[in-house]
Image (spheres, rainbow, N blue to C red):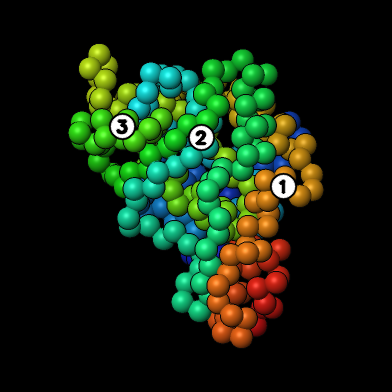
Amino acid sequence: MVECETAFGKPSSAITLGTLNNVPVAFVQRHGVGHTIPPAFINVRANIAALRSVGCTQVLSVSAVGSLTHDAPPGSFVLIDQYIDRTIKRDKTFFGPGLVGHVPFGDPVCGRMRSVLATAAQTADVQALNGGTYVVMEGPQFSTRAESHLYRQWGGTVIGMTAMPEAKLAREAELCYAMIAIPTDFDCWHESHEDVNATLVAERMADTFTLTRRLVTEAVTRLGEHRGACSAGCDHALDTAVMTAPEHRDPEMVARLLTVAPNATHLGAKP
């Protein structure tokens, strides 16, 4: 266990270090030990910074979600490739006054990682929908029925509260990022299934634990084989992102950003 203090505060939990099939791994409990941190209060910037500080280059996120389609029934898995961000209260960037940046985000998930996850799902004999849109709501309340139907009309595949700003911050940190979403319910749109509630989510997550462990183990084993540059370009996301002229960049902001994107030395030296 590693207790971290980052330039963006403390992460949700200590970082657990270990190996999985001889692959070095680090784990942070995004909701804190005992699930004490609501979605909107998670210090995602600190979580990403802490993972960077212990040497992570790839982030595999697992999230319980509600399903918005029959194609992703409870008990299955979805390998997310797109997001609709409806959150409004969260710190979503490592940039700020003195250092303005806009990273490309048309493909918010590392395509290389998602391809590896798809292969891992086949090998592990796990039912996984390869591709899907995650609607990220602010919470902490679940959807109204009208909202649930609206998100279905938008083309949402699943709905949850935790995927943003994880994916955005991972991109700014030049980390490869992918998500396994685990539908536990049909939100509240399905007439033949009970509406989502917290107890149901916890029970369904427990039910899928064995399959989740099998999929994650296979995925991590394969991801551990990756060496070198990311073919999707995640590790160079800041190359064309910064708008602020070099002579006007705040050295302190640059130094903070370099703690999460240490390879972006073109931004300027630490003060």
Please state which of the two labelled residues, at mark 3 or mark 2, is closer to the viewer: 3
Task: Say which element carries label 2.
Answer: loop
**Residue at image point 64% right, 19% down:** 122
Question: What is the quadrant of the C terminus in the image?
Answer: bottom right
Instruction: Answer whether residue 247 is visible to the viewer in this image.
Output: yes
* Of residues 211 and 165, the one drawn nearer to the viewer in this rendering: 165
Label whose residue precedes the other's in the sequence (1 or 3): 3
Report, in whole angstroms, how far the alpha carbon at label 1 lies from the one at label 2. Answer: 18 Å
Could you tell which of marks 3 and 2 lies nearer the N-terminus?
2
The percent position of residue 60, horizontal first and vertical second, equals 59, 40
Residue at 68% x, 57% y: name it: 236
Q: Which residue is mark 1?
A: 230
Give the image location of residue 164, x and y in percent.
43, 48
Report which residue position mark 2 lands on: 80
Residue that appears at 59% across and 45% down: 177
Question: Residue flagged by tag 3: what amino acid is it?
Answer: Gln
The residue that label 3 is drawn on is: 153
Label 2 neighbour load within 10 Å: few <14, some 14-19, many 20+: many
Label 1's element? loop
Q: Secondary structure at mark 3?
A: helix
Determine contact: label 3, label 2, CB under 8 Å. Answer: no
- The residue positioned farthest toward the bottom in the image shown: 247
Q: Position of residue 148 (x, y in %)?
A: 27, 32
Classify mark 1: residues with Cα within 10 Å, few (<14), some (14-19) or many (20+): some
Q: Residue sitting at 46 percent across and 28 percent down?
A: 182
Q: Report the Cα–Cα distance between label 1 and label 3.
A: 34 Å
User: Which comes before the other along the chain, label 1 or label 2?
Assistant: 2
Q: Quadrant of residue 192?
A: top left
